Image (cartoon, helix red, strand yellow):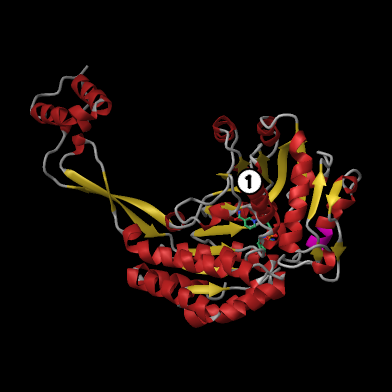
Amino acid sequence: MEGLEGLRRTFRSGRTRGVDWRKAQLLALVKYLAENEAQILEALEQDLGKHPVEAYRDEIGLVKKSAEHSLLNIKKWMAPKKAQLPLLLFPSRAEVLPEPLGTVLIIGSWNFPFSLTLDPLIGAISAGNTVVIKPSELAPACSSLLCRTIPCYLDSEAIKIIEGGSDVAEQLLQHPWDKIFFTGSPRVGRTIMSAAAKHLTPVTLELGGKCPVILDSFSDSDFKVAVKRIASGKWGSCAGQACIGIDYVLVQQKFASLLVESLKSCIKRFYGENMEKLQNICRIVNNQHFDRICKFLEEPGVAASIVYGGSINREKLMIEPTILLDPPLDSQIMTEEIFGPLLPIITLDNIEESIDFINARPKPLTIYGFTKNGKLKEQILQETSSGSVVFNDSLIQFICDGLPFGGVGPSGFGRYHGKYSFDTFSHEKPVMHRTFFLELEPRHPPWNEFKMDFIRLAYKFDYVGLLLLLLGLRRMFTPNRSR
Ligand code: NAD
């Protein structure tokens, strides 16, 4: 690949290792976001019909906050961490030294074209790597803007944006990267992983899946807040085209009609009365995804389960926020990731049944538990597995720099955000410093019974390590007693 050798040369030169270079790049990124805000908002409007407020919340503001967080902490993250050693090894000291991995590849998705490329970039820069970013071709205005503008701000001998589709990504994957950070579908995730395996390249896979809500019973006021948060978690971020967006809701049968009515009024207030007046909601990214989502609604039994919405506008690529009550569990809407503005509500006799319901399906990226019941919370935590769990809210985990963000099982592996991004793009190198003072003879042959006992004890009781050390020193002068 043209330019890859240049990036490797830059890395080998050591330029990206210094804290000054890393900070300068992060500051330049903050400047980039400030000076290009209007163009970024325009590109997001063009590709996805993202409202400027939503766009600032989920992309510009989020990335800026993340860069500032790294700027504040980077020196601390880079510092070697002292490590504890067994007394037996006295005198010596050790530390864990984070080192950059080298030249890394970031492949992004289209739904958050800036945050899903620039947020991992912050981690890669903070850790001192050189980087290639391949944004998604499905958000072409954003991809082109990144490609044109980023080199004007960041060190172009260390950070490159390469535009293109799956063909370009496949070519990029032929090269021996030091890390591949991928955000996208589980299907392409498999391709990434097998390409990486050829070079034994480590990967982080940020994938998707079906994120459920478990909605317990609440007082009136709490229920209203819960419904607002569920509506926002479904339709408020890229019209449901979000990996951590709510996929479906599990609720007790007796609360279902109240939930549907409350969601309806929420939708009307947030996004407009009907299809013609739809506002504050993204469009579907392209025809292919539009058809994919519409197909869910065409399945027998699914259309009949629509209790709100269901209108579409092919020309504008808009799908109305849609609620479905108990669609068939074997229909595609319930077996595939929806990634669009359709919300199935599944009713249960008891809310505890939601545990088995979730466990019968692939591990989700997030489980949203709306409950005040400590026992149910504990059950969700102990009896299910997911990338994360959020109680009584939705989506907000993405803005928390202190929490690792990532999946488990089919929803992906590896993690990032804040310090976790720095770690993801670093190798934690253990370094030991020994002296030539004191030589422990029992570690060396010729073996004998005493040495066996010595090693057994030394491994078992570190606190007697020093004692054993002294004993070992004494015995080092005694003749060998072979068995
Ligand atoms: P996608 O897998 O189709 O594409 C992602 C990236 O992979 C794009 O840059 C694309 O060009 C590239 N790509 C496509 N085919 C490829 C191939 N054969 N070889 C190599 N690269 C290839 O995913 P998408 O449609 O952009 O995004 C939707 C999926 O991503 C959903 O499943 C969603 O849940 C997931 N997602 C996950 C996160 C997360 O943080 N966990 C965030 C956003 C989206």
Quadrant for the C terminus in the image: top left
**Quick one: 398 or 459, which is closer to the camera?**
398
Give the answer, above or below, for where 220 lies relative to 399. above
Q: Residue furthest front?
A: 220
Q: Residue at x 64, y 39 (%)?
A: 218
Q: Residue at x 40, y 54 (%)?
A: 427
Q: Which residue is mark 1?
A: 221
- Horizontal and vertical percent position of residue 41: 62, 75
Is 474 part of what is drawn in magenta?
no
84 vs 380, left or right, is: left
Give the answer, above or below, for where 108 lies relative to 226. below
- Horizontal and vertical percent position of residue 351: 68, 32
Q: Residue at x 66, y 76 (%)?
A: 43
Give the answer, above or below, for where 33 lies relative to 416. below
**Quick one: 384 or 393, which is closer to the camera?**
393
- Horizontal and vertical percent position of residue 419: 42, 56
Q: In terms of secondary structure, what is the magenta stretch mainly?
A: helix
Task: Kindly tell me whether residue 245 is visible in this rendering.
Answer: no
- Horizontal and vertical percent position of residue 95: 27, 50
Q: In which quarter of the view is residue 25 placed?
A: bottom left
Q: Residues within 10 Å of mark 1 (few under 14, many from 20)?
A: few
Task: Kindly tell me whether residue 449 is visible in this rendering.
Answer: yes
If the picture is divided into quarters, which one holds ligand 1? bottom right
192 vs 265, left or right, is: left
Q: In which quarter of the view is residue 86 placed?
A: top left
Give the answer, above or below, for where 308 lies relative to 34. above
Q: Which residues are magenta?
A: 288-292
